[in-house]
Amino acid sequence: MSGLVQVIASESEFDTVTSSGVVLVDFFAPWCGPCKRLAPILEEIAAAGAGKIAKVDIDTFGALARKFNVESVPTLIVFKDGQVAERLIGLQQAETLKNALQKASQ
């Protein structure tokens, strides 16, 4: 990854990242094929300045995954000021994700 997408390294970092503004969080697993195909789409969105993107490895942070009822990966959750604004499950196109970020920003 190029560094445009923030990989969450702790639960406190997750809280800090999602507490203010709009952020798209990708709950993923390293072994997940669709998650791997989603990674360049997320990089594209971040590079275009369309929104803040973070990733949470569900194998490392199972408690966070359970807290947000992540039952399959990838699960993408848009947070606005710490609250869930939208949830998308499965591989998504860039436009769908950009629209979700824009909608939450209004």
Image (cartoon, rainbow, N blue to C red):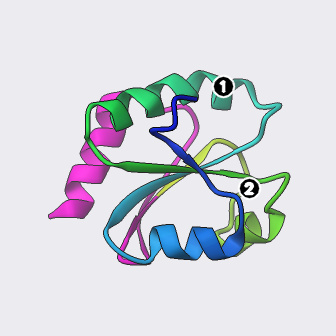
- Residue 70 higher or lower than 96, as above or below: below
Residue 68: image location, x then y, percent:
64, 69
**Amino acid type at image mark 1:** Lys
Q: Residues within 10 Å of mark 2 (few under 14, many from 20)?
A: few
- Give whichever of 13, 85 is nearer the camera: 13
Residue 13: image location, x then y, percent:
61, 69
**Amino acid type at image mark 2:** Glu
Q: Point out which mark residue 71 bears.
A: 2
In this view, which residue lies farthest toward the front?
A: 3
Q: Is residue 59 left or right of residue 74?
A: right
At x 29%, y 51%, the residue is 101
Q: SS class of the residue under badge 1?
A: helix
Q: Is residue 80 magenta?
A: yes
Q: Residues within 10 Å of mark 1 (few under 14, many from 20)?
A: some
At x 33%, y 37%, the residue is 96
Are the residues at dot 1 and dot 2 in contact (C-beta closer than 8 Å)? no
Q: Is residue 26 left or right of residue 24?
A: right
Q: Is residue 79 magenta?
A: yes
- Residue 83 higher or lower than 70, as above or below: below
Residue 102: image location, x then y, percent:
21, 51
Whichever of labels 1 and 2 marks the residue nearer the N terminus, that label is 1
Q: Which residue is mark 1?
A: 36
Q: Is residue 25 left or right of residue 7?
A: left
Q: SS class of the residue under badge 2?
A: loop
Residue 58: image location, x then y, percent:
77, 53
Quadrant where the N terminus sits is: top right
Q: Is residue 9 left or right of residue 1?
A: right
Q: Magenta stretch?
A: 78-106
At x 36%, y 41%, the residue is 97
Residue 82 figure quarter: bottom left
- Give whichever of 5, 58 is nearer the camera: 5
